[in-house]
Amino acid sequence: MPGSDSQPAPLQTGGGPVDALSFHYGHPDPEAFPVAELRSAIEDTLQRHTAAALLYGPEQGPPLLLDILHQMLQRDEGLQITPEHLFITAGASQGLDLICRLWTRPGDVVLVEAPSYHEAIAVLRDYPVRLVAVELDEEGLRDEALADTLSRLQAEGSHVAFLYTIPSFQNPSGVTMSSERRQSLAALARASGLRIVEDDVYRDLSYETIMPPSLFEMMEGRGVLRLGSFSKTLAPGLRLGWTLAEPEAVSQMAQSGLRRSAGGANPFTAYAVAEFCRGGHLEPHIKRLVALYRTRRDAMRQALDATMPPGVTWTRPLGGFFVWLTLPQPLTARAVRTAAEAQGITFPTGEPFFATGGGERNIRLAFSYVSPADIARGMRILGEAIRAVS
């Protein structure tokens, strides 16, 4: 577990006691950061790209990084894309914000999963749109519920700007959308003209499965804006991500007022990450991360199996950072958290992850930032807290 000087700020949903063992943070472990390789990449950037890296950058992003990303996506996923399909952002959240700025109008509907990433919900709420939630189950977004929702919205004359979905190792649920559901969603989107924003930042953190094709791939790139990021696989402080989209959409993003006035997103960081990738460091680093986080995921599974009382259920993620726990009625997550904090652990309850209400019996448990020993101790305390309020 990293030292206290590297602890991130508590979630807005309530960080708990300062000295509590926290399962809030869906963050990479700072001890896994490839510091030596990043230092070398930064030195190479200053030597090879001094002016380009320190001046305003191209609106779309540095061609060096765009080319590296497009080659990686071609190699790893077989995508038939060019650099013109990519747009560099200051993290995936900036990509989502720009999509909202360009493709929503006041009064539009944005569809979100229930539950969904609470920070994405916060970004969406910065805009005068109406959020409409569609339920998940163990296979991901419920396609029949989505079809019914679209029919209802069409009947009432509402314009749907896009669907925001996290199909792979979803935050907060840990669920991965099945291939069948993805195919059904792609067919529905083609038939209805539904635009999809596919948040795929956890895709590389797969612990035991071959990943289903992305929605971008299934729809041959049409009508999908796919968000990627180096925050989960390299370091969130770099604030670097990308959007994969049709070239026309990329051009629209590059010509936005913000980009035309401020240049590209984080040019120096973009060149440093390009040099990191060009040096062959990214793939070995991701393999180390997968081994590290798989061990923690397994420790969480084992601890929950050993400590949870009857009636408590939880997801079994195939990758990513999160387990989603559901309490039996009439227990509430807030009551359990109060009891757990008295014994020295804390976690977010489920309400902030629902755009339109819900989550009172849910708990999100992040395992990426906690050692296996602390996971075992924390789940023992959680089990005791649940029994105490039952």
Image (tube, helix red, strand yellow):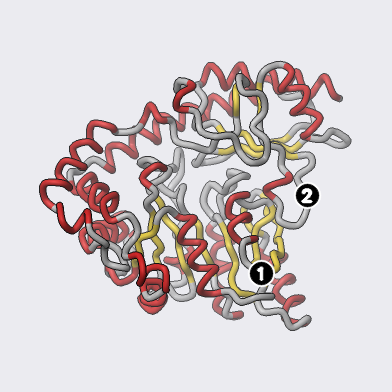
Residue situated in front as seen by the camera: 214 or 226:
226
Type of amino acid at the residue the image marks with label 1: Pro
**8 horizontally vs 114: left or right:** left
Q: State the residue at coordinates (34%, 33%).
A: 33
Type of amino acid at the residue the image marks with label 2: Gly
What label does residue 358 carry, if any? 2
Percent across and percent down for residue 134 are 70, 61
**Which image quadrant is residue 252 in?**
bottom left
**Which image quadrant is residue 255 in?**
bottom left
Percent across and percent down for residue 306 are 66, 20
Q: State the residue at coordinates (31%, 67%).
A: 60
| Residue 305 appears in the figure | no
Residue situated in front as seen by the camera: 48 or 185:
48
Q: Secondary structure at mark 2?
A: loop
Q: State the residue at coordinates (49%, 28%).
A: 7
Percent across and percent down for residue 124 are 61, 61
Classify mark 2: residues with Cα within 10 Å, few (<14), some (14-19) or many (20+): some
What label does residue 128 carry, if any? 1
**44 horizontally vs 333: left or right:** left
